[in-house]
Image (tube, helix red, strand yellow):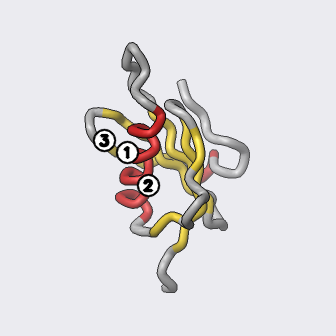
Amino acid sequence: MDSPTLGYGRAGAQIVEVGGNTFRVYTELNGNRVEAHRVNVIFPPPSRLMILQQAHEAIVQVTSCDIKKGSLIGDQAMVKAILICPSA
């Protein structure tokens, strides 16, 4: 079972599927940071690059924001990023 980092827990998660992988996307309540947790099990694990690409797509789908260049980091289980959202 996945759980978000401190600061994301009250925000709730949105679930999205990209390329056969399921992600729970958590956003900060009052911030511009996001976490995407891959929650499906695949053996052997998929490549890190593929998961980063799919997590990027999942984050953009859920938030409708761009990701700050160079901020997308993570592994096959959890990816973090900083969002650049259009002004309201």
Which amino acid type corresponds to the residue marked 1 in the rendered image?
Gln
Which amino acid type corresponds to the residue marked 2 in the rendered image?
Ile
Residue at 45 percent of width and 69 percent of height: 65
Q: Earlier in the sequence, mark 2 or mark 1?
A: 1
Q: Quote the CA–CA distance across marks 1 and 3.
A: 9 Å
Q: Are marks 2 and 1 in contact (CB under 8 Å)?
A: no
Q: In the image, residue 32 lies at what x, y percent? A: 61, 66
Q: In the image, residue 10 lies at what x, y percent? A: 62, 50
Mark 3 lies on residue = 17
User: Relative to 54, is 39 above or below?
Assistant: above
Viewer-side label of 2, 1: 1
Q: Earlier in the sequence, mark 1 or mark 3?
A: 3
Viewer-side label of 1, 3: 1
Q: Quote the CA–CA distance across marks 2 and 1.
A: 9 Å
Residue sitting at the far right: 6
Q: Is residue 68 left or right of residue 63?
A: right
Q: In the image, residue 81 lies at what x, y percent? A: 58, 55
Residue at 36 percent of width and 35 percent of height: 22
* Label number found at residue 59: 2
Quick one: label 1, few (<14), some, or many (20+) residues within 10 Å? many
Mark 1 lies on residue = 54
Q: Choose top left, top right, bottom left or bottom right for residue 27.
A: bottom right
